[in-house]
Image: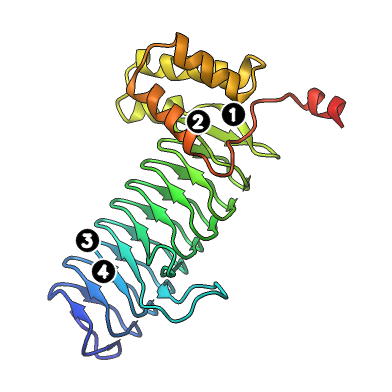
Amino acid sequence: MNQPLAYVHPQAKIAPNVVIEPFVNIEKNVIVDEGTWIGSNVTIMEGARIGKNCRIFPGAVISAIPQDLKFDGEETIVKIGNNVTIREFVTINRGTKANMETVIGNNCLLMAYVHIAHDCILGNNVILANAATLAGHINIGDWAIVGGLAAVHQFVHIGTHSMISGGSMVRKDVPPYAKAGREPLSFAGVNSIGLRRRGFPNDRINDIQEIYRFLFLKGLNVTQAVRYIERNLTATFERDEILSFIANSQRGIMKGYTRVKDRNLAS
């Protein structure tokens, strides 16, 4: 359904059953797949690729050019998967020549006022709570949750099934299955509740907890902990995923748990 008060560029490709509310603006070189609802006052700019059964709430701006001074007008895109909910006033910038695209996976929830900068890649089932802000080139794994008002530094990698506390300043990589909070950002336990909700049995959760005991709670540095885990803990999919994440980390992983008293003594 196309409202007469909306503007849709003749070169935009819109599936027949897409609902477009009044005062929507859709530019050329846009593709919107079937079943998607676009609320009033949404702006969809050149380069947007929007999947099936998405819901885009009023005031959102999709595929605006990057806020990157190196951007030189290259033809890049925003790719949004199926069943994605984009709440009010979310902004998603398209890619630059570095990656050529910004990607949002399937079944994601982007709450109101979220900002996703150029070249970010979000996996499936990711939740960004209200006003979470992502700088450029951030990679977020499947099922990760970023709390409201969190700010994530460029090039940070956030692992699968992780959970980041609201208001966090995320300057380092957050490994899979972990919770992160405090300032500076540090390990706050394993996301055991989230894992149980997703069907992980207790023995697998216990194995993950054991890995993080050696990584963050035994007084070892990262190199020592990784060496011990490789030699002494049973090889599992989760163990190998965590070790691979650490090995490929460009910014380094977040700090281990430290008590307030320890931080005061250190200062």
Residue named by callout 1: 188
Given residues 19 and 94, the one toward you in this image is 94
Q: Nearer the viewer, mark 3 or mark 2?
A: 2
Residues at circles 3 and 2 in contact by the CB criterion of under 8 Å? no
Given residues 75 and 2, the one toward you in this image is 75
Task: Locate the N terminus by quadrant.
Answer: bottom left
**Helix, strand or loop at disc 4?**
strand
**Which residue type carries mark 2?**
Ala
Q: Nearer the viewer, mark 1 or mark 3?
A: 1
Q: Please provide percent x and percent y for residue 258.
A: 71, 25
Q: Earlier in the sequence, mark 4 or mark 1?
A: 4
Task: Locate the C terminus by quadrant.
Answer: top right
Residue named by callout 4: 37
Residue shown at 27% from the left, 77% from the top: 30
**Helix, strand or loop at disc 2?**
strand
Picture quadrant of residue 206? top left
Q: Earlier in the sequence, mark 1 or mark 3?
A: 3
Residue shown at 55% from the left, 41% from the top: 173
